[in-house]
């Protein structure tokens, strides 16, 4: 696995954990809500990754950049 892939996965995990902890700290301990928060946190990252028009990163990234 490339270092850039490890960094990307780390970002996804950090976002999911932060959203889940924030919701938990607000007093909501329902597992479905916590899972939903984690998914909602990483959804924009996945959308950006799979957008071929996004030249900054993801599948549309310019390999020379």
Image (tube, rainbow, N blue to C red):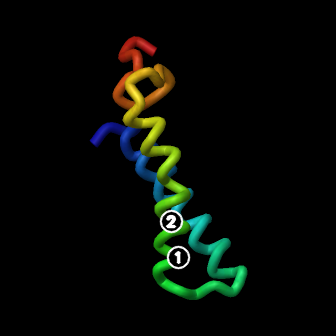
| Circle 2 residues within 10 Å: few <14, some 14–19, many ≥20 | many
The residue singled out by tag 2 in the image is 38
Residue drawn at the location 72% of the way across and 80% of the way down: 26
Task: Answer with left or right where residue 52 lies relative to residue 29.
Answer: left
Residue drawn at the location 41% of the way across and 50% of the way down: 9
Q: Position of residue 57 (x, y in %)?
A: 45, 29
Spatial distance from mark 2 to mark 1, Cα to Cα?
A: 6 Å
Residue drawn at the location 40% of the way across and 12% of the way down: 64
Which quadrant of the figure has residue 47?
Answer: top left
Give the label on residue 15, or none.
none
Give the label on residue 34, or none.
1
Q: Position of residue 51 (x, y in %)?
A: 41, 30
Q: Secondary structure at mark 1?
A: helix
| Circle 1 residues within 10 Å: few <14, some 14–19, many ≥20 | many
Task: Answer with left or right where residue 37 lies relative to residue 47.
Answer: right
Q: Secondary structure at mark 2?
A: helix
**Quadrant holding the N terminus:** top left
The reply to whether the C-beta atoms of the residues labelled 2 and 1 are less than 8 Å apart is: yes
Say above or below: 32 vs 59: below
Q: Nearer the viewer, residue 1 or 24?
A: 24
Q: Residue extending furthest right? A: 26
Q: Position of residue 40 (x, y in %)?
A: 52, 59
Say above or below: 30 vs 40: below
Q: Residue extending furthest top? A: 64
């Amino acid at each position: 696995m490339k270092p850039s892939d490890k960094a990307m996965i780390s970002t996804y995990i950090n976002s999911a954990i932060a959203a889940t902890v924030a919701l938990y700290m607000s007093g909501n301990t329902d597992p479905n809500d916590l899972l939903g928060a984690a998914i909602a946190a990483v959804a924009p990252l996945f959308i950006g990754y799979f957008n071929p028009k996004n030249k900054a990163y993801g599948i549309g990234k310019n390999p020379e950049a």
